[in-house]
Image (cartoon, grey):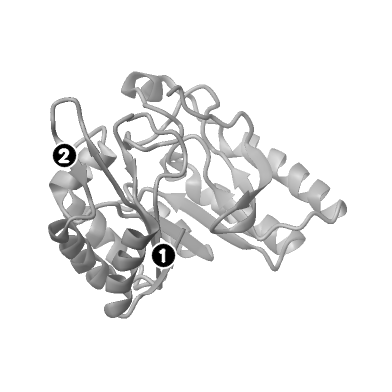
């Protein structure tokens, strides 16, 4: 799988299962995925650390005028959007000026689309940066990834490019005092070396539920694979399995949605 890359700073609006009419914001290059992880299910395809290191990110001075022009045009055209959503070609919070861009987007939202929420789809790996943490706290809908409860499954599914501890990521998520949502993709598969990948086992679910209890998010969103994946061996989880997992999340008092 070569992957899907967005070629614009602003794209859409598109119809999202989770967010309705979503206007996408891509802070990353259009030539390569730029991410701190190389998830085996990523719709952008496999990443390369060399490509990421060589990629140049547009400064805030180039990004904000594009956003301003597009927001003004959509406002004048009376385009309806439900969410302004950081997504795109990798991890948006990697951008060194993420906080400044977020401040600009909040101002533009307030001026042109005051009823629209701001969402960030994030892999939760940049929360050690205070500027990123504060920026995410300032938006309506920080939607943070947590695909595993154990370090070993985290490494198998999310494949971080550098050493990362799931304990540290989850501790940083606790800093939000519950004012965030968690999204988890469930899957199964068997790699060519016969390694089993399955974050739906009793052991994994128990560890993941413990993480959720500590984080105490306002909502947990569960979903299966929905697109072609770079790792070909993966299996889409059936709806009944997702609903069974959702029931366990609801039993610890956390609102849950399945897609």
What residue is drawn where x is 36% and y is 66%?
243
User: Which picture quadrant has residue 34?
Assistant: top left
* Pick the front one: 35 or 207: 207
* Pick the front one: 129 or 142: 142
What residue is drawn where x is 71% and y is 66%?
114
* Pick the front one: 248 or 240: 240
User: Which picture quadrant has residue 70?
Assistant: top right
x, y percentage for residue 22?
A: 63, 52
Determine the residue located farthest toward the right in the rendered image: 76
* As drawn, 159 above or below 143: above
- For label 2, count other residues whose C-alpha is less than 10 Å away and answer few (under 14), some (14-19) or many (20+): few
What residue sits right under mark 2 in the picture? 196
What residue sits right under mark 1 in the picture? 181
Q: Earlier in the sequence, mark 1 or mark 2?
A: 1
x, y percentage for residue 90?
A: 44, 37
User: Which picture quadrant has residue 163?
Assistant: top left
| Residue 63 horizontal side relative to residue 186, left or right | right
Q: Secondary structure at mark 2?
A: strand
Measured in 3D between alpha carbons, the distance from the residue under mark 1 to the one under mark 2, in whole angstroms, is 28 Å
What residue is drawn where x is 76% and y is 58%?
80
């Amino acid at each position: 799988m070569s992957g899907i890359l967005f070629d614009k700073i602003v794209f859409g609006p598109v119809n999202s299962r989770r967010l309705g009419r979503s206007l996408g914001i891509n802070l990353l290059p259009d030539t390569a995925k730029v991410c701190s992880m190389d998830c085996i299910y990523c719709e952008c395809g496999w990443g390369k650390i060399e490509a990421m290191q060589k990629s140049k990110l547009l400064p805030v001075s180039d990004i904000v005028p594009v956003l301003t022009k597009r927001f003004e045009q959509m406002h004048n055209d009376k385009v309806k959007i439900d969410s302004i959503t950081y997504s795109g070609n990798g991890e948006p919070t990697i951008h060194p000026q993420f906080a400044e861009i977020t401040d600009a987007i909040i101002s533009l939202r307030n001026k042109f689309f005051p009823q629209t929420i701001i969402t960030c789809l994030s892999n939760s790996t940049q929360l050690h940066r205070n500027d990123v943490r504060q920026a995410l706290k300032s938006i309506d809908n920080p939607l943070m990834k947590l695909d595993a409860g154990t370090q070993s499954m985290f490494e198998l599914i999310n494949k971080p490019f550098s050493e990362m501890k799931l304990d540290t990521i989850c501790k940083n998520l606790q800093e939000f005092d519950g004012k965030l949502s968690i999204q988890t993709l469930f899957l199964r598969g068997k790699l060519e070396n016969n390694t089993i990948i399955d974050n739906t086992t009793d052991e994994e679910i128990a560890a993941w539920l413990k993480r959720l209890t500590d984080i105490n998010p306002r909502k947990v969103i569960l979903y299966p694979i929905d697109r072609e994946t770079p790792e070909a061996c993966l299996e889409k989880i059936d709806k009944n399995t997702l609903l069974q997992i959702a029931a366990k999340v609801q039993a610890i008092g956390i609102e849950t949605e399945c897609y």
